[in-house]
Structures are given as C-alpha cells and as structure tokens.
Image: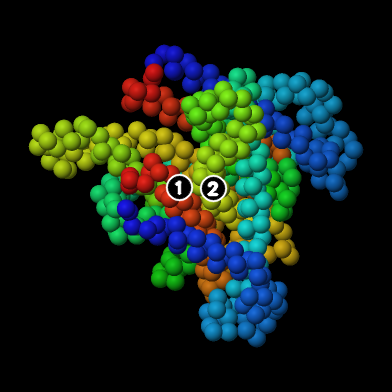
C-alpha cells in the first residue's frame, strides 16, 4: 500500500474552502465588497481587514470573495460546456467511426492548432469583452481537449471483449453506454474536468487582467490585480492577495485533479 | 518513414487550411455590419463604409470573399490597419521582434533549468521529499505569470530603487539595456514552464529507468551518472521534445500577457489595443500568422520525432 494520497486531500480542502467562501458570498468577512472607507485606505493585513484594504479603503478579502464567485462561475460554465460539446463529439466520433470520426477529429485538430490565449482573445474580439465573451472563449478553447481525451478510451471500450459480448447478446446502444461506457469514462472525465478548471481559472484571470473579462461593476480577481498595480508602490497588499487568490484557486483544482488521477487510475497506482 | 512523413505533411496542410478558414470567418461572426463596426459607429461617412465593404468584398458570396482574402494574404497583403492606415503586415513586423525575443528567451531558460531539475526529481521518488517537490511543481505550473511579474517588479524596485525594470529598449540600440530589461519578464515567463517541463522530464526519466536496457547497463557496471545521463536521459528526451513543441505555444500566449505587465511593445499589446479599437484586419492577421508559425513548428517537432524515435515511423 502506498501512503494515503496527501495531494488529493490538500486539493480537496483548498477547493472546498474557496467554493464555500464563494457560495456564502462577500459577506463572509463582514464587509460589503464595494463599501468605501477613505479613512482606512491602503492598509496592510490586520485583524479588522485580514487581507488589508485598497485605494478606496475597500476590504480586499470581501472583494476577492466576490471575485471568486465570478471566476468560479465563468470557469465552471465554460468547462462544462466544453465537456458536453467536446466530450459528446469525441465519444460519438469513436463509437461511430468512419467519416464522422475523421471530420470531427480533423475539425478539433484545427481548433487545437490555435495558441490558447490567442484563440480566446480572437473570440472575445468577436463577441466583445465581458462574462459572455470569456465564457464562450474558454469553452471553445477546451472543446477539442475533451473531444480528444474521451475519444481514446471510448475507442478502446468499443472494441473491448465485454462490450462486444454485450452487443452480441443484443444489448441496446443506450444500455451499453449506461452500463459500460459511462462508468469507465467517469474517472477520465473527473480528472480532466478538475485539471481543465485549474487552467480555465488562469485563462479567465489572464483575460480579465488584460481588461477583456467581466466589466465593472462585476467583481473580478484579474481586474483587481491589474487595478492594484496602479498603487503598487504605496501598498502591495491588494496585488499580493488578488494574485494569491488566483493561484490558490488554480492550485486547488490542479492538486485535486492530480490526486484523483493517482487514486482513480489503477495503472498509475504502483508507478511514480 | 516516407509514408509517415507524407501523412504528417497532409495533416499539416489541412490544419493550416482550416486555420485560415476559421480566421477568415471571424469577421463574419461579428454581430452587426462588420464594415460599420470597424469604422466606429460615430464618425464613419457612408462613402467610407461603402469603400471598406467593397475592399472586404462583403457583398460577394462567402467563397469568393475567402478567395480574395487568402489570395491577398498569400502575397503578404493583410489590408491596412483601420486606425493608422499603415499596412497591417508593417505594424506586425514592427512588434513581432519583442514577442519572439521574449518567447524564445523564456522557453530557453525553462529548458536549461527543467532538464537537470527533472532528473533530480526522478531520483527522489516515493519519499516525503517527492510529495513536497510535486506540490511545489504543481504550484509552479498554476502560478499566474502576470502576478509573478507584478511581484518581481515590486520586489526589485523595493530593493534597488534606481533600476528601470519596466519598458523597452531595442536590442540594436542598447544590447545590454535590452537584456537587462528582459530579465524579469523572462523569469516570470520561464518559472511556470520550468515546473511543467521538469514534470515531463521526471515522468519520462522514471519510465526510462524501468526499462531492461537500464538494468543491463547497471549489470555490466556502468556508473550511475552514465546510466542516468547517457542511457535514460537520451530516451527520456523523446516525450520532452513533444512537450517543448507544445510549450512554445504556451510561452507565446504567456508573453502576450507578460508584455502588458512590463509595458513591452510586442504583439500582445498590439492585439489587445486592436480589440478595443475593433481593428479586425490587424487581429485576423496576427492570429493567422502566429497560428501558422505554430502549425509549422509542431510539424517540425513531428518530423524530429520520426527521426529520433524509430518506433514512431511504423
């Protein structure tokens, strides 16, 4: 037996804390994210303001929590969209084979050829900056990844002996999908969703850092970091914590995905 | 070998064609009248809009428009920048050097550090140190480069108040000044890549060290250093080459963002500016050219793969 999986647990705890904070909302630290207190501007971390205050005296922690909400919502919506569209495409392509497989996968090759950030920027250029633009951009970017990741295992399953046997005794397609495909693909999906969320968070934060993400007054960690660069010399704390929040969000999901991979893939269990 | 090469070639041509079609369609996916939007709703005279529609061929069938567009693109005519009136290719040419320098320095620094770091990590497996290294390297991968860059600026200016860390001077004008200003952006860009690439090296080394030829080498008394560097590393480099090819695209994307942090006048700042100005010919040309470069690089990586790994030729 290997030691218990600390990476999985650290990831799970990080994600749980942040998701909980985002769910409870900005009130969690006792301040309104937009409430200004000019007398208390540019403070460092203290008992009253754990993460300090910004140039308007707004509480950095409650602004970060509001930012988490936006970050998680956009990342989750776009990764789920990519999973549904890309994943379905990959599974159906592998299952049906032939020309459909060829056409679908070559299309995915084309999408995959664009450098990630550049594709996202191009899509934002079409739709316009904002939550809608970034969600669609990130969703499109991750679609070929899910198509590719799910096509491989589906191909193996399609030709697996027990699936051929199930088909031979007359099991319907939906039944094979429910009883064999879904349980076998679930670990792959779980790992990939977790890892994709981690990078989608970074892409969303990059886009809003560049001013292409959610627009004011919606809170955004990327924009918060960009804005706090203007008074970096006076107080680095808002920049420190905005970036730290982005890092912790991406880190949590990445550790979770990495740990899940160890846990769920028996082939890896005795390696590394 | 020949068959595999031909197949890669055909795939590359198809992907390049697909990329050009998607990039072309971009302008047609904009909600509303593209010509009107490009010129800005307020100050565009009807004549100007009509002239732009004419130039873009917006009233022609889509296939004809694509033919016109790609035909011009193939001879280097991507139109004129809507705001400056200069040829788009000229605008890109003036900026691309900064981005290439940043991307290549970032990738080069990452490779130089990642290979020995990955080898070291492979020898630490299954211990407490291994978990610590894994968590640190995952944290490195998820490190937002634009935050790291910001913190580097703050740290450096606090310690060395007089040093100019933001801004750009051309290499030709002042080589030392140029490189000095590249140090912080390159660190910000390279660190996440070091983490990602060293993980690849580590995994590939562990895989290679389990092979029979390693046991044979040890059995015949080869020193451990030679086993690691001459036998295992050479084989571990095969997946590493693929990872480097992919990483080049990521580094390019990263430098687009990092340019904003360090006020470097590269492609990133050009394209971000173009979005707010709705300067679509410039955006299209940048996306098309950059993507085609990466399609070409990945093709070369595939060819290199065929050369160094006989198993891939089958």
Q: Nearer the viewer, residue B259 or B198?
A: B198
Q: Can you see residue B172?
A: no
The x, y position of residue A134, in whole percent, is 67, 50
Instruction: Identify the residue at horizontal 56%, vertical 28% (top origin).
Output: A166
Look at mark 1 in the image and give the residue it sits on: A264
Tell which residue pokes out farthest to the front in this image.
Answer: A169
- The residue where tag 2 is placed is A190
Report whether residue B216 is seen. yes
Task: Residue lying at the far left in this picture: please name it.
Answer: B221
Of all chains, the one bearing label 1 is A
Residue name at image x 25 percent, y 34 percent: B211
**Residue at x 48% of width, y 55% of height:** A256
Instruction: Please tell me whether mark 1 sits on a helix, a strand or a loop.
Output: helix
Report the Cα–Cα distance between label 1 and label 2: 9 Å
Q: At 80% from the left edge and 37% from the top edge, which residue is drawn?
A: B34
Q: Earlier in the sequence, mark 1 or mark 2?
A: 2
Q: Residue furthest right?
A: B46
Task: Tell me how the rendering is colored.
Answer: rainbow
Question: x, y percentage for residue B204?
Answer: 33, 40
In screen coordinates, is B220 left or right of B70? left
Residue B1's place in the image compared with B158, above or below, is above
Q: Position of residue B124 (x, y in %)?
A: 26, 52
x then y, percent, for residue B86: 68, 37
Q: Are marks 1 and 2 in contact (CB under 8 Å)?
A: yes
10 Å neighbourhood of mark 2: few (<14), some, or many (≥20)? some
What crowding class fits label 1: few (fewer than 14 Cα within 10 Å), some (14-19), or many (20 or more)?
Answer: some
> In which quarter of the view is residue A39 placed?
bottom right
- Asked whether B61 or A82 is in front, the reply is A82
Q: Nearer the viewer, mark 1 or mark 2?
A: 1
Image: A44 above or below A118: below
In the image, B229: left or right of A13? left
């Amino acid at each position: 037996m290997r030691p218990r999986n600390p990476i999985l647990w650290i990831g799970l705890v990080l994600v749980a804390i942040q998701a909980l904070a985002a769910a409870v909302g900005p009130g969690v630290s006792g301040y309104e994210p937009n409430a200004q207190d000019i007398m208390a501007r540019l403070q460092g971390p203290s008992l009253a303001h754990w993460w300090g205050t910004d140039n308007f005296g707004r509480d950095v922690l409650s602004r970060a929590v509001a930012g988490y909400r936006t970050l998680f919502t956009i990342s989750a919506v776009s990764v789920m969209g990519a999973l549904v569209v890309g994943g379905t495409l990959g599974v159906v392509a592998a299952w049906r084979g032939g020309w459909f497989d060829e056409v679908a996968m070559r299309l995915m090759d084309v999408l995959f050829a664009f450098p990630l950030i550049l594709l996202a920027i191009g899509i934002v250029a079409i739709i316009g900056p904002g939550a809608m633009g970034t969600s669609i951009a990130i969703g499109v970017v991750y679609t070929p990844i899910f198509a590719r990741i799910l096509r491989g295992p589906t191909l193996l399953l399609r030709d697996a002996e027990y699936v051929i046997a199930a088909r031979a005794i007359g099991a319907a397609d939906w039944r094979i999908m429910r009883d064999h495909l879904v349980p076998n693909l679930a670990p792959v999906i779980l790992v990939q969703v977790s890892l994709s969320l981690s990078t989608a968070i970074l892409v969303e934060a990059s886009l809003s850092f560049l001013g292409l993400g959610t627009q004011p007054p919606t809170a955004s960690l990327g924009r918060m970091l960009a804005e706090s660069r203007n008074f970096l010399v006076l107080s680095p704390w808002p920049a420190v914590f905005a970036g730290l929040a982005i890092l912790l969000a991406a880190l949590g999901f990445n550790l979770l995905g990495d740990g899940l991979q160890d846990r769920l893939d028996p082939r890896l269990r005795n390696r590394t | 070998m020949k068959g595999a090469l031909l197949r890669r070639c055909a795939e590359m041509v198809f992907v390049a064609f697909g990329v050009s079609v998607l990039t072309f369609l971009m302008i047609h996916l904009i909600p509303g009248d593209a010509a009107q939007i490009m010129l800005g709703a307020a100050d565009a005279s009807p004549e100007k809009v009509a002239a732009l529609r004419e130039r873009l061929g917006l009233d022609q069938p889509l296939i004809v428009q694509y033919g016109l567009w790609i035909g011009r693109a193939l001879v280097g005519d991507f139109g004129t920048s809507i705001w400056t009136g200069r040829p788009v290719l000229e605008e890109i040419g003036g900026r691309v050097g900064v981005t290439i320098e940043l991307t290549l320095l970032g990738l080069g620094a990452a490779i130089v550090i990642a290979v020995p770091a990955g080898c070291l990590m492979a020898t630490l497996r299954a211990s407490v140190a291994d978990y610590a290294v894994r968590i640190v390297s995952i944290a490195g991968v998820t490190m937002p480069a634009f935050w790291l860059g910001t913190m580097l600026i703050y740290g450096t200016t606090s310690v060395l108040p007089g040093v100019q860390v933001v801004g750009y001077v051309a290499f030709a004008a002042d080589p030392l000044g140029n490189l000095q200003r590249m140090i912080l952006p390159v660190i910000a860009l390279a660190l996440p890549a070091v983490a990602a690439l060293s993980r690849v090296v580590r995994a590939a080394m562990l895989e290679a060290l389990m092979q029979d030829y390693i046991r044979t080498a040890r059995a015949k008394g080869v020193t451990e250093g030679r086993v690691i560097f001459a036998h295992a590393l050479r084989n571990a480099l095969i997946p590493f080459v693929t990872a480097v090819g992919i990483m080049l695209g990521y580094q390019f994307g990263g430098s687009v963002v990092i340019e904003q942090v360090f006020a470097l006048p590269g492609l990133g700042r050009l394209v971000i500016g173009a979005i707010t100005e709705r300067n679509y010919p410039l955006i299209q040309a940048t996306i098309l050219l950059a993507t085609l470069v990466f399609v070409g690089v990945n093709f070369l990586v595939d060819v290199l793969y065929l050369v160094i790994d006989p198993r891939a030729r089958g």
